[in-house]
Amino acid sequence: MLHSRVAVMTGTATRQALALEDSFLTHNYHPLPVVAKSAKGAWVKDVEGKKYLDCLAAYSAVNFGHRHPVLTRAARRQLRSVTLTSRAFHHNLLGTFAKELAELVGMEMVLPMNSGAEAVESAIKVARAWGYRVRGVPENMATIIVADNNFHGRTISIVSFSSDESSKKDFGPFTPGFVSVPYGDADALEKAMDDSVVAVLLEPIQGEAGIIVPPEGYLARVRQVTKDRNVLLVLDEIQSGLGRTGATLQCQNEGVVPDMVILGKALGGGIVPVSAVAGMRSVLGVLAPGQHGSTFGGNPLAVAVGLAVVRLLATGTMQKRSRALGVHLHRRLQELIGHGVLDVRGVGLRAGIDIDPVLATGREVCEALMVRGVLAKDTHGSTIRLAPPIVVSKKDLDWGIDQLAEALSDLAKKKRG
């Protein structure tokens, strides 16, 4: 149920749209009552004509802003030629896309898919096949180590190794073959290693858990442990990658090269679903024709947009901008600690902000921000996440942070009576 102030703020067009969704749409999300009609850059306009600063960027799928002209131009151009062939045939852009994406992320081969969860599932299949065909692990005995509080998607296999009970309740039986250890604890991970382990699957920064940044040196230590044990390191950069943290990949900030990297969200430029597993030839090369596929994976429209994204990132401009604005963002957010904020974490233009639960829930803060024209998302009760598009101006970013400060101040005044 909406808080009374939020309910008052919604107009007729919004209420009509929400009523239709409530009647005919499966209730698998609990969105804020904003009904977007148009968007450009870092700004969204709703059906009432109100503008909002987008500080979520569709969970980093809109890293380069809404309707980036380079990306929309690539989509329009492809729409005039061919949009789908399936992988039963070749098309003229696929090889170029695979080559340039592999080079961008320092890998050798690319497996194109659609959604992030589909790419994670693909990486799991490849890791298991590699374990049996290269490592010689006994059939059906392969184990993959994951981290507590991970979020890699919502398919049955992925929720099988989730520690979020709300993601698992009533969805069993679950897929076996996963062992979970505390995130950021390299000793615990090393102790979990045995001869059945074929891969370690991690987020370089945990997203849904609240933008949890591991201790310095953690990823490098995990990389060394996996190399020593001839185990694959698979990094899920679906949310942290493609410019979000001031580098093309967050693992590059840590000086770590995995065996496979999982990409999605921003790879589609906020236009079409595009995901991929990029990896070393010795790993992705284990797949043979007919063993894995996707009708839409690598389709011409998706590849045209994905290739434009790759070339946008190849200049390094987006990464540099994210780095500089990220320093400013975190400096401003640190000033809010003690003023309704308990802690701030993150890298680049990605921040997790722990709200004092005595003051408000994360949802209540996001509702207050919505009223002030800022879109953000809560997680785990008292944490809110900020991830504005990289194209956001410093002035607009400051305005958004000012709205957060004022919203917290208003909530504190109400709390005092």
Image (tube, helix red, strand yellow):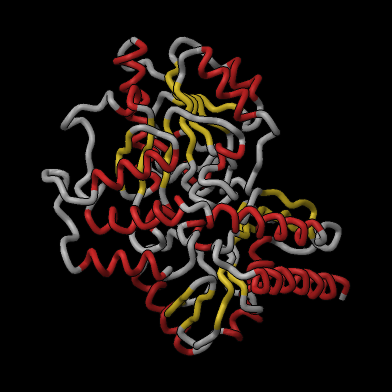
Q: Position of residue 388 (x, y in %)?
A: 58, 63
**Residue under the point 70% across and 60% down:** 329
Residue situated in front as seen by the camera: 166 or 407 = 407
Residue 173 in sight here = no
The answer to whether residue 255 is left or right of residue 357 is: left
**Residue under the point 66% across and 36% down:** 214
Q: Quadrant of residue 176?
A: top left
The answer to whether residue 295 is left or right of residue 233 is: left
Quarter of the image for the N terminus: give it: bottom right
State the count of labels. 0
Residue situated in front as seen by the camera: 165 or 74 = 74
Residue situated in front as seen by the camera: 105 or 20 = 105
Q: Position of residue 320 (x, y in %)?
A: 59, 54
Q: Quadrant of residue 99?
A: top left
Q: Quadrant of residue 32?
A: bottom right
Q: What is the residue that sits farthest to the left in this orientation?
A: 89
Q: Position of residue 293 (x, y in %)?
A: 22, 39
Q: Does residue 212 lie above or below 49 as drawn? A: above
Q: What is the residue that sits farthest to the right in this orientation?
A: 416
**Residue under the point 61% across and 86% down:** 8
Q: What is the residue that sits farthest to the front in this orientation?
A: 315
Q: Position of residue 244 (x, y in %)?
A: 55, 52
**Residue under the point 51% across and 49% down:** 239
Q: Does residue 96 lie above or below 201 as drawn? A: below
Residue 114 in sight here = yes
Residue situated in front as seen by the camera: 123 or 106 = 106
Quarter of the image for the C terminus: give it: bottom right
Q: Does residue 79 lie above or below 372 as drawn? A: above
